[in-house]
Image (cartoon, grey):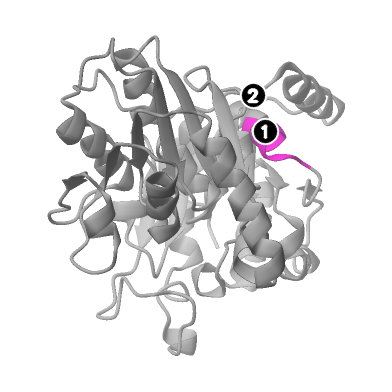
Amino acid sequence: MNPQEVKSILLFKLRYMGDVLMTTPAIRLLRQSYPKASITMIVNKGTEDVLRYNPHLDQIVTIDREMVEKKPFYKRVPYEWKVLRDLRRGHYNISVDFDSGERGAYMALLSGIGIRIGFHYSKGFRRLIFTHQVHREGVSHTVERNLLLVEKTMGLVRTDDTLELYTGPEDDRRMALWLQRHQLSGKDFVIIQPGARFSSKLWPAEKWASLIDILQKDLRLHVVVTGGQKEIKYLQTIMSGIKARVLSLVGQTTVLELAVLLKKASLFIGTDSGPMHIAAAVGTPLIALFGPTDPLVWGPWGKGHYVISRYLPCSPCKYTHCNLGKESCMEQISIEDVLNAVCQHFERPLPLQ
C-alpha cells in the first residue's frame, strides 16, 4: 500500500478502556508509516480519554454503546444512520478493525471503505466483510496481535511496541496540588485499585483491607485507594475493614487524572482492569492479580511488572460468573503472595506476622 495514495485511515476498537490502550503501539506504527494520512479512530463512549491527547490521531469518534445496544429500534436507527453518514463523508481508503465485534465490520462495509482489514473468523459475517484478514495462531498478547494485524496486511515493521498515554496540563496541575497537599512523593506511595468490571475478577475485600494495613503499618508505605463510582459498595466494604487511616480518591478522579497519579506512584497493585493497563502505559511498576483471564493475553505490557495467578483446570474461563465459591482462582491468591511481590519490588524483608 503506497503511503502517497492513502489519504485517510479509519480504525475501530469498540471495547473497553484497556483494550483501547493496547492498540496504541499499532496506532503509532500506522502514523509512522503514513505520516500524511488522516487517521480517525472509533471507540465506545467512555473509553476515549486514553486517546484524547494522542498525537498520532487526527480525530476520535465515539459510539454510544447504550444507544446502539439498549435503546428501542426507532431511536437506534436514526443514531446509527447519522454515524454512518458522517463516516461516508470521510472517504476513507483503509479501515482496520482491532476486534470490535461484528459492529465494526458492518460499519466499515457500509461506510464504503474498499480495503477492510481485520482478524480472520471461521464463522459469522466478518470473514466475508474483511478484504484482508490475519489468522490468530496460538496464544499471544493482545498488543502483539494488534501489531501483527497491521504488519501482516500492510507490510509494516514496528520500531518499538510500548504503550502510550498522554495527559493534559489541567490533569497534571490538579494532581500535583493533591499530592502536595497530602505531602506525597513518588518514593513512598502505592496506589491500590481493587475494582474490576466482573465480580469473578475481584479479590476478597477482607484481604485487601489486611494488605493495606500491613503496607502502612509494617512497611511504612503510604497507600492511596482509587476506584470508580460503579464499584463503590465493594470499595466501602474494603475501607470499613482498614484499621489505619488511608487516603481515598474513590470516585474523585477522571481517567487522565488517575493516569497522572499513577505516573507519580512507586507501585500499583490491582486486578485485571483498565487502570492496570493505564499503569503499564505510564511506566509504573505494578502487581496484577489475575484469576479467570489469561495474563499471557491480557496481562500488563512491558517490563518490571509482577503477575500473580492461580491456574485452575477451568481457567481461563468466560469469567462473568464463577461457581467455585471459596475455591475460586482469586480466592486462592493469598496476602503473602502479594506481600512477597511488594517486598521484592522495594527490596525489603517480609514483615513478621
**204 versus 248 height, above or below:** below
Task: Name the quadrant of the N terminus.
Answer: top left
Residue 276: percent from left, percent from top: 51, 46
Label 2 vs 1, first from the N-terminus: 2
Residue in view at x 42 percent, y 75 percent:
332
Q: Mark 2 points at which residue?
A: 167
Q: Nearer the viewer, residue 320 or 240?
A: 320
Q: Which of 353 and 26 is in front in this view?
A: 26
Tell me: 350 left or right of 238. Answer: left
Q: Which amino acid does label 1 sit on?
A: Leu
Q: Which mark is residue 172?
A: none
Residue beneath the point at 17% across and 53% down? 136
Task: Give the position of the C terminus as an image quadrant.
Answer: bottom right
Q: Relative to the observer, which residue lies in front, 249 or 24?
A: 24
Between residue 108 and residue 66, name the one nearer to us.
108
Instruction: Work out which residue is located at the far right of the displayed protein and give it.
Output: 181
Crowding near the residue tagged with mark 2, few <14, some 14–19, many ≥20 C-alpha atoms within 10 Å: many
**In the image, which residues are magenta?**
253-259
Q: Can residue 119 be seen here? A: yes
Residue 17 higher or lower than 58, as above or below: below
Rendering coords of residue 352 (x, y %): 53, 57
User: Is 243 on the left or on the right of 287, as rendered?
Assistant: right
Q: In this view, does 236 lie above or below 50?
A: below
**Label 1: which residue?**
256
- Mark 1 falls on what kind of element? helix
Q: What residue type is labelled 2?
A: Thr
In-image side of 75 versus 182 (left or right): left
- Picture quarter containing residue 78? bottom right
Whether tag 2 and tag 1 are in contact, CB under 8 A, the answer is yes
Q: Which residue is drawn at 67% across and 39% down?
A: 255
